[in-house]
Amino acid sequence: MSAPTTASRPRRLAMVLADLARGGIGKMRVHLANAFAAEGVAVDLLLARTGSPYRELIGPGVRLVDLGTSHAWFGVPRMAAYLLRERPDVVLTQRSRVNALVLRSRALCGLKMPVHSTFNTNQSAQLASLAPAKARSQLAQMRRWYPQNDGLIAISHGVADDAATLLGLDRAAMRIIYNPVVTPELHARAAGPAGHPWFGDGGAPVILGVGRLEPQKDFATLLDAFARLIAGGADYRLLILGEGKLRGALEAQVAQLGLGGRVALPGFAVNPYPYMAGARLLVMSSAWEGLGNVLVEALALGTPVVSTDCPNGPAEILEHGRYGRLVPVGDAAALADAIRATLAAPLPAAQLRAATARFTLATAAAQYLDALGLAR
């Protein structure tokens, strides 16, 4: 039997990540992989760590490949072997070390397939959160390898501006593609049970925070703002979905503020949408972001939002306050005032939903396929 011709061969895309983890980046990658597969692209999802609750979202048209490691040097033999064996038409990476790994492996193989990479967060803020030696090493790696990509994609205009300035890249050559947040399944998944007794017990309404319990999300400021709200006589409860290294510190802060009966930290939820649909308000208190997926998810469900005006994304999503109040990072008093004002006069649900048309899976998938040269 003769080999398939180039014209009949399925387009093959390799998506390379360190892991899917529990954050928004992993979930968005799974959404995209499923959409690409639905368009007839053969998708390989290469992961160094395959354990993640988001694995259950991976569709049947996506092949999971265990990469073993995403180390920029030690992972080269296995990555190179994959490239030589599978010969993908294009490779899409994220994270600096993963990008360096793929580009090194491509050079070792002597192959010409294009490699594209995404910027998923504010790189300057991310580097500033690291120890100085690690930040210098990572910055040097980024400046060496990112210019060698065949294409660069940023998930917001602010992220693109920051990356171009920080790394000396051509801003005009970078593509801006918003995350595929609004999927066809979002509303159906939101109709399920929230899984917490505060939804449906007839008690005080719930204010919601969603994100990893890490410094970037700055839930400490949200707790301080909530304490101010309660001290002013408001009757609400605060639920924060997520897990991370700051759980102990946040629980101690809850106790210190005397909010034990009004604040719950139930952990990570694979499906946060019923919580968003049932909440009176969603608050994002981040110190920095790449876009701010939870804002889009809440708006798509008609739930009002308040956010810090952090770099980057919230101002773009909310159109500088048109669809939700923006406050300075780390300002608990301003955050409390914005929460209070939004609860008193929330925008109509239909108006909030209208703000999310730019963030659909169909739109993002089509833009990615065009950027990667896989559109037909």
Image (cartoon, grey):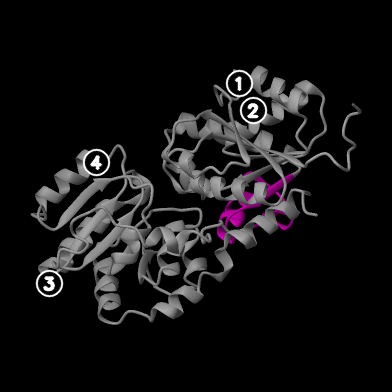
Residue receiving disc 2: 101
Question: Do residues under tags 2 and 1 come within 8 Å of each other at their CB atoms?
Answer: yes
Q: Residues within 10 Å of mark 3 (few under 14, many from 20)?
A: few
Residue furthest out toward the front: 1
Q: Is-magenta flag for residue 172?
A: yes
Local secondary structure at mark 4: helix
Name the N-terminal-most of marks 1 and 4: 1
Q: Residues within 10 Å of mark 4 (few under 14, many from 20)?
A: some
Q: Position of residue 66 (x, y in %)?
A: 56, 26
Residue receiving disc 4: 247
Task: Give the camera-side residue of 199 and 3.
Answer: 3
Residue 140 figure quarter: top right
Disc nearest the viewer among 3 and 1: 1
Q: Residues within 10 Å of mark 2 (few under 14, many from 20)?
A: many
* For residue 266, side relative to residue 99 (left or right): left
Residue plotted at (71% across, 30% down): 103
Name the N-terminal-most of marks 2 and 4: 2
Measured in 3D between alpha carbons, the distance from the residue under mark 2 to the one under mark 4, in whole angstroms, is 33 Å
Local secondary structure at mark 2: helix
Task: Give the camera-side residue of 26 and 153.
Answer: 26
For the record, the magenta segment spans 151-176
Name the N-terminal-most of marks 2 and 1: 1
Measured in 3D between alpha carbons, the distance from the residue under mark 3 to the one under mark 1, in whole angstroms, is 55 Å
Residue receiving disc 3: 232
Local secondary structure at mark 1: loop
Residue 75 bears which disc, if any? 1
Measured in 3D between alpha carbons, the distance from the residue under mark 2 to the one under mark 3, in whole angstroms, is 53 Å
Q: Position of residue 65 (x, y in %)?
A: 60, 29
* For residue 38, side relative to residue 376 (left or right): left
